[in-house]
Amino acid sequence: MLKHLSFTSSNKKMISQAEENYLKAIYKINEREGKSANTNAISAAMNTTAASVTDMLKRLADKDFIHYEKYKGVTLTTEGSRTATALVRKHRIWEVFLCDKLGYSWDECHDLAEQLEHIQSPDLIDRLDTFLGKPKFDPHGDPIPDRDGNYAKRQQVRLDEMLIGDRGVMVGVHEHSSAFLQHLDRVGLVLAVQVEVLEVFDFDKSVKIRLNGLQELLISNKVSENVFIKIA
């Protein structure tokens, strides 16, 4: 399934890096949760206070990048969606380049891509996309919009939503922190690994799984709720 959003805009607005980062955070919350973003969610994503978020949301609303009403959810306007989607495209393409061509690990590429995504050169990103073979997903399993805003949508569930006996392939993560990704590396829970649910413990919602039909592993609920699986 492809979602379409044109990047073409005749009303280019000046926007700071801080404002871009907020738009991207709102985009990701909308993308992953499928609903409007509230102040608390944005505050957690940006690691800042609710008061700072409120101030920024007012600025973004004044520039017509978002629809915002106090105590209600935040959604992107058409202009905000164009800007955020283009930024996410740049970020995820840079992540692919850093991991696939420069040998960075998936826990290292995010912070570097955060810096590179603000380079204002659509032609550079188009060339980089072509050079990489127009990848559909980044190293964390997140979809990469193409130049027209189209991106692949796949059927996936969180590991904590799976039932005993369910099997699938790990295709992504919700949490992108270095500590979390390094932990997944240590236990072998990485993209493309086959996962089978063996047992779910009522006490703490921890899950026993089998990887690639061989290794058995007990994972916490914190891990299982941040891992995406495509059911076989």
Image: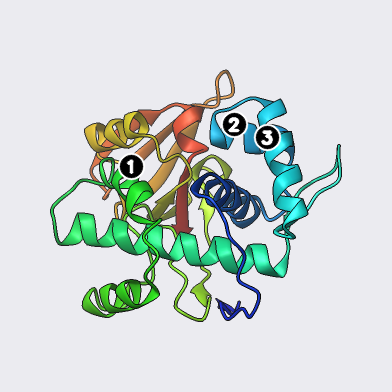
Dividing the image into 4 quarters, which one contains the C terminus? bottom left
The disc, 3 or 2, on the residue closer to the chain's N-terminal end is 2
Which residue occupies 66% across, 75% down? 11
Q: Which residue lies under the disc numbered 3?
A: 53
Sequence order check: which comes first, mark 1 or mark 3? 3
Does residue 32 sit above or below 71 in this rendering? below
Residue topped by disc 2 = 44
In screen coordinates, is 184 left or right of 219? left
Q: CA distance from mark 1 to mark 2?
A: 17 Å
- Residue type marked 3: Val
- Number of marks in the rendered image: 3
Give the residue number, with chain letter if any, for mark 1.
111
Q: According to the image, what is the colour scheme of the structure? A: rainbow
Instruction: Give the Cα distance between marks 1 and 3.
Output: 21 Å
Q: Which mark is residue 19?
A: none
Q: Is residue 87 left or right of residue 44?
A: left
How many residues crowd around disc 1 within 10 Å: few (fewer than 14), some, or many (20 or more)?
few
Residue 159 vertical placement versus 88 (above, below): above
Q: Are marks 3 and 2 in contact (CB under 8 Å)?
A: no
